[in-house]
Image (cartoon, rainbow, N blue to C red):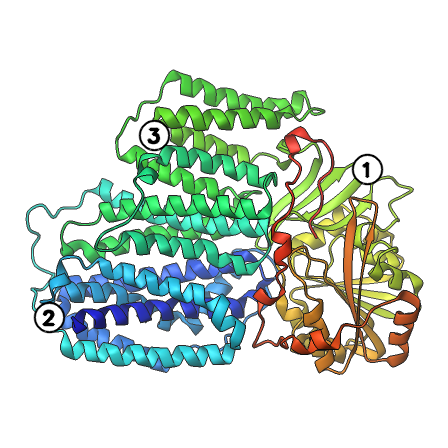
């Protein structure tokens, strides 16, 4: 019995180490690449690639030499990471989404944790083969160890944001990881001594009934890809369409791992209705995708529905994978190689390919298409009637012609809803896999259609890149810039009104009133975060303004579709790339006013508000200089974090929030820091800036480059929001998310 638990311990701890280092490294890399959820996706793709490489290595050697000889290789492998313990990697700020950028992340990950991750990825498959070749009573079902491995991964994923990230900084996290690795190493050596190989080598000739058909291999591949696509797509939807909170990224991945835990065990558990009603689940998932994009549901309901359907789809994929596994242990390693190859291909498609070819998050629908393809390969009821063809053609014609013939009406949204419901209640219950597949492909094509398909507003420009989806929308005489669903700037279209500053940059709001008053007469101004370039409207001809912007698409939009930059009399400079790295490289630049406006979007670069970051800003301020932070965010409350950072650096800190009853009630929250007593007293007396409560500040843990805790700044009260307006039935302008 102790031998079996020893195998389980080694397998579970290795999986825990595997995913914990994944989270640690992703946390280190994330800020330097804009905080985008696609950075997390790129890391997942790398780890899928490393996992595939580990499986291929173990499969090749075990098939050639058998377990008796391979176990010596395995012992050497687990000793090898002692030379490559993970440390803090170097990361560069990219200039935009491109193949060199993706390769940059990939190569840096290879150089930092590649060897470690490769070795850990071989442990699970080796343990299963070790069990299969042993004399233990449980050798008949080695796949149960994969459930243990998935449980270890799930435990690492669940414990990190709620335990390790909350209480330990990155240095302590890495030291704990190293200690746990030594524990796994000791247990592995013990296992090597105790559990002998009694079975024959795997490399013998195939016995009868062991052949694996090509169709079966394809289904392994597709099911492996589908699970990864669905959970990564759900992650993208959560960040881009629901809540821009990186903490929530662990939910889809956790549900994905839980589906393995429940299905790859001695007695797999999967509700029968998931398999029997997979057609209904596919249709419901397609419908939910379009409804979430329209913000029909409150945030909490949208999260529950999305994660619930994602979990059901992942359960189906893993249940089918387990049902299609090889009958004998001979093909165990080959099985893991094929479905991990599918996982890598799914991650590659979701993170690297789709963002370059689509303006919307169609990877979610792509996952449904892959699942529907497996249903077609199962060969059940593959009829595709003339009626299905006619309905598909009618849908395509309506989509193409309606916006051209009737641009003043938004009835196409109603038509889409009708077609979606028809898809759910007709295609689904008919259970025709070919019809379902064709319907899903059609819906995926519709999602690629111009974004004003559902919206009465005119979408002037849209583009998806590495940092998210940027849109320029004209509505009600106002041109607005959105990143995802977050407002980043606005301007009147009328020639005589375009100089008025809108949204949270209005002179009636805290940041605008300070800039408009020109009390401090700054000569040189630095602005981190370009947006539409609105803040340049406050600059005069005697001033120089430096804009720091990470996303090159934002730079293009601000110059092409807004006139704030062109109309400004100031001398304007643009610095593309990460602001901290740019400031570190240009040590001579000094500012009288430095505005940090980078915390309102779906990718919050927390490294810009750590103690080290603020200390860097201070070094770039002239005597009497002022730091101004725009921290408006629906789901994050950052003012106490900044107050604690400012107090640690001896700064005077004040904050102020304001609202205006125009342009859909904009609420704007700002924090000011200065080391000049007179300037701070002026802000307090003239503009009524408020000092933070010192008791609250003292209780807030200091954020550094080694420690940030997203959980502590999430506004849980905002997760229960009201039902948003439904675009097909309401022509009113949308409410921006700040």
Which mark sits nearer the N-terminus, 1 or 2? 2
| Label drawn at residue 433 | 3
Sequence-wise, the earlier of marks 2 and 3 is: 2
Residue 434 rendering spot, x and y as whole percentages = 35, 28
Relative side of 342 to 143, left or right: right
Identify the element where label 1 is drawn: loop
| Residue 695 visible in the current orientation | yes
For marks 3 and 1 on the same chain, the one whose residue lies earlier in the sequence: 3
**Is residue 520 shown to the viewer in this render?**
no
Q: Is residue 510 above or below residue 416?
A: below
Label 2 crowd (10 A; few <14 / some 14-19 / many >=20): many
Residue 615: % across, % down: 71, 79
Q: Quadrant of the N terminus?
A: bottom left
Instruction: Report the front residue among 340 and 702.
Output: 702
Answer with left or right where residue 192 lies relative to residue 222: left
Q: Looking at the rendering, which quadrant does residue 146 occupy?
A: bottom left
Q: Residue at x 47, y 56 (%)?
A: 251
Q: Residues within 10 Å of mark 1 (few under 14, many from 20)?
A: few
Q: Residue at x 69, y 57 (%)?
A: 633
Name the one closer to the observer, 493 or 573.
493
Residue to which mark 1 is pinned:
477
Q: Percent position (x, y) of residue 308?
A: 44, 46
Could you give the CA–CA distance between mark 3 and mark 1, rounded to whole angstroms?
47 Å
Residue at point 36% right, 40% down? 371
Q: Are the residues flagged by discs 3 and 1 in contact, CB closer than 8 Å? A: no
Whole-angstrom CA distance, mark 2 to mark 3, is 46 Å
Residue 197 bears which disc, if any?
2
Q: At 53% across and 70% down in the image, what residue appears?
A: 28
Which residue occupies the foreground of this view, 192 or 384? 192
């Amino acid at each position: 019995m102790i031998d079996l638990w020893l195998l389980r311990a080694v397998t579970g701890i290795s999986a825990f180490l595997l995913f914990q280092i994944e989270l640690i490294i992703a946390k280190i890399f994330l800020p330097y690449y804009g905080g985008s959820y696609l950075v997390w996706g790129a890391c997942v793709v790398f780890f899928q690639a490393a996992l595939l490489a580990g499986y291929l290595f173990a499969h090749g050697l075990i098939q050639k030499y058998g377990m008796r000889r391979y176990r010596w290789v395995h012992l050497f492998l687990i000793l090898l990471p002692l030379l490559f313990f993970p440390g803090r990697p170097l990361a560069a700020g990219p200039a935009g989404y491109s193949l060199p950028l993706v390769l940059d992340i990939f190569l840096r990950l290879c150089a930092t944790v590649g060897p470690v991750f490769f070795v850990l990825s071989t442990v699970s498959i080796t343990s299963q083969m070790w069990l299969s070749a042993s004399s233990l009573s449980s050798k008949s079902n080695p796949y149960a160890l994969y459930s243990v491995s998935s449980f270890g991964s799930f435990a690492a994923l669940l414990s990190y944001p709620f335990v390790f990230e909350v209480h330990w900084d990155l240095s302590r996290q890495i030291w704990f990881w190293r200690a746990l690795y030594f524990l796994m190493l000791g247990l592995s050596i013990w296992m090597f001594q105790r559990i002998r190989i009694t079975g024959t080598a795997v490399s013998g000739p195939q016995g009868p009934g062991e052949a694996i058909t090509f169709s079966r291999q394809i289904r392994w591949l597709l099911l492996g890809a589908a699970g990864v696509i669905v959970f990564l797509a759900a992650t993208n939807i959560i960040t881009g369409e629901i809540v821009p909170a990186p903490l929530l990224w662990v939910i889809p991945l956790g549900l994905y791992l839980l589906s393995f835990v429940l299905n790859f065990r001695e007695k797999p558990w999967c509700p029968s209705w998931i398999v029997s009603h997979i057609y209904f689940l596919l249709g419901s998932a397609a419908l939910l995708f379009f409804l979430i994009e329209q913000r029909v549901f409150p945030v909490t309901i949208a999260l529950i529905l999305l994660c619930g359907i994602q979990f059901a789809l992942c359960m189906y994929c893993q249940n089918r994978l387990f049902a299609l596994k090889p009958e004998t242990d001979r093909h165990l390693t080959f099985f893991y190689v094929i479905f991990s190859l599918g996982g890598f291909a799914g991650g590659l498609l979701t993170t690297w390919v789709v963002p370059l070819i689509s303006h919307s998050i169609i990877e979610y629908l792509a996952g449904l298409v892959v699942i529907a393809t497996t249903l077609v390969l199962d060969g059940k009821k593959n009829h595709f009637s003339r009626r299905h063809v006619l309905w598909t053609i009618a849908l395509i014609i309506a989509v193409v012609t309606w916006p051209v013939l009737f641009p003043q009406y938004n009835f196409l949204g109603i038509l889409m809803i009708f077609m979606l419901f028809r898809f759910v209640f007709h295609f689904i219950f008919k259970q025709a896999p070919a019809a379902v597949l064709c319907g899903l492909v059609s819906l995926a094509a519709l999602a690629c259609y111009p974004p004003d398909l559902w919206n009465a507003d005119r979408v002037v420009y849209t583009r998806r890149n590495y940092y998210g989806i940027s849109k320029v929308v004209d509505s009600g005489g106002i041109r607005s810039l959105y990143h995802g669903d977050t407002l980043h700037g606005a301007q009147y279209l009328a020639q005589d009104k375009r100089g008025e500053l809108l949204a949270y940059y209005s002179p009636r709001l805290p940041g605008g009133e300070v800039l408009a008053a020109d009390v401090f007469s700054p000569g040189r101004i630095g602005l981190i975060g370009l947006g539409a370039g609105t803040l340049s409207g406050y600059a005069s001809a005697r001033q120089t303004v430096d804009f720091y912007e990470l996303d090159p698409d934002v730079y293009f939009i601000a110059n092409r579709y807004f006139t704030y930059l062109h109309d400004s009399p100031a001398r304007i400079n643009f610095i593309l790339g990460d602001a901290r790295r740019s400031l570190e490289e240009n040590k001579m630049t000094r500012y009288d006013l430095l505005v940090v406006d980078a915390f309102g979007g779906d990718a919050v670069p927390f490294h810009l508000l750590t103690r080290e970051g603020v200390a860097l800003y201070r070094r770039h301020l002239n005597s009497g200089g002022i730091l101004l932070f725009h921290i408006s965010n629906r789901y994050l409350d950052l003012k106490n974090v900044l107050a604690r950072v400012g107090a640690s650096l001896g700064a005077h800190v004040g904050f102020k929030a304001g609202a205006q009853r125009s342009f859909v009630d904009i609420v704007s929250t700002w924090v000011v820091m200065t080391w000049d007593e007179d300037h701070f007293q002026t802000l307090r007396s003239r503009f009524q800036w408020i000092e933070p409560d010192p008791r609250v500040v003292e209780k807030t843990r200091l954020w550094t480059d080694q420690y940030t805790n997203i959980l502590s700044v999430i506004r849980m009260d905002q997760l229960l929001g009201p039902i948003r307006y439904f675009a097909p039935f309401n022509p009113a302008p949308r409410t921006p998310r700040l």
